[in-house]
Structure formats: C-alpha cells, structure tokens
Amino acid sequence: MVGRRSKMGEVEARFGQPVASLIKHYYYEKGYTLDQLARLFGVGRATVSVWMLKLGLPTRDWKLPDPAKINYDTYHNK
C-alpha cells in the first residue's frame, strides 16, 4: 500500500536508527529479553523473532536449568 509504513519502518523512524542497530544495542549489549524488546518497540515477541531471523541476528544460547540445582519444594504447596 502506498503511504503505509511497515512496523519495522515505524520503529526505525521513532528511534532514528535501524532495527538491527537497536537490537544489537538492547539485546546483546544491555541484555534485554525478546519480550522486553517487543514492549520497547511496541510489537509482539514473534515479530522481534522474525526480524532477528531476517536480519541474521542470532538469539542468545539458553539451557534448561540443572535438575540437581532446582528446589522442587518451591513448586509444591506445603
């Protein structure tokens, strides 16, 4: 559509920087989560994930917690 700006374009206009630069700053340097980025940009988490895929920006590695270090008592009513 003519005159319609994409969400990515809206974010770039609002912040005055390319989305790739914003993600690099907030996600990699400041440690924001994808949910925090989504709130910051005013889009959904899935949108941020798609942008990162399109821009070739990998998500941080994560691991499941070590079962030996989980305090299961906190998950059960006593």
Image (cartoon, rainbow, N blue to C red):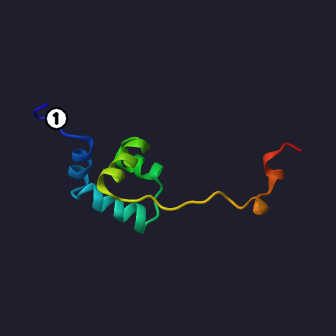
Q: In this orientation, which residue lies closer to the viewer: 15 or 18?
A: 18
- State left or right for residue 64 relative to residue 62: right
Q: How many marks?
A: 1
Q: Residue at x 20, y 50 (%)?
A: 13
Dot 1 crowding, Cα within 10 Å, few <14, some 14–19, many 20+: few
- State left or right for residue 61 relative to residue 15: right
Across and down, in percent, residue 8 comes to 26, 46
Across and down, in percent, residue 10 comes to 23, 45
Residue farthest to the left, as pictured: 2
Q: In this orientation, which residue lies closer to the viewer: 61 or 47?
A: 61
Residue farthest to the right, as pictured: 78
Q: Residue at x 78, y 62 (%)?
A: 68
In what quadrant of the picture does the C terminus appear? top right
- State left or right for residue 29 relative to residue 16: right
Across and down, in percent, residue 20 comes to 29, 58
In what quadrant of the picture does the N terminus appear? top left
Residue 71: quadrant of the picture: bottom right
Residue 58: quadrant of the picture: bottom left
Q: Residue at x 80, y 51 (%)?
A: 74
Across and down, in percent, residue 47 comes to 37, 43
Circle 1 residue: 4
Looking at the picture, does residue 55 appear above or below residue 44?
below
Q: Residue at x 48, y 55 (%)?
A: 33
Amino acid carrying mark 1 in the image: Arg
Looking at the picture, does residue 6 appear above or below residue 40?
above
Please tell me whether mark 1 sits on a helix, a strand or a loop: loop
Residue farthest to the top, as pictured: 1
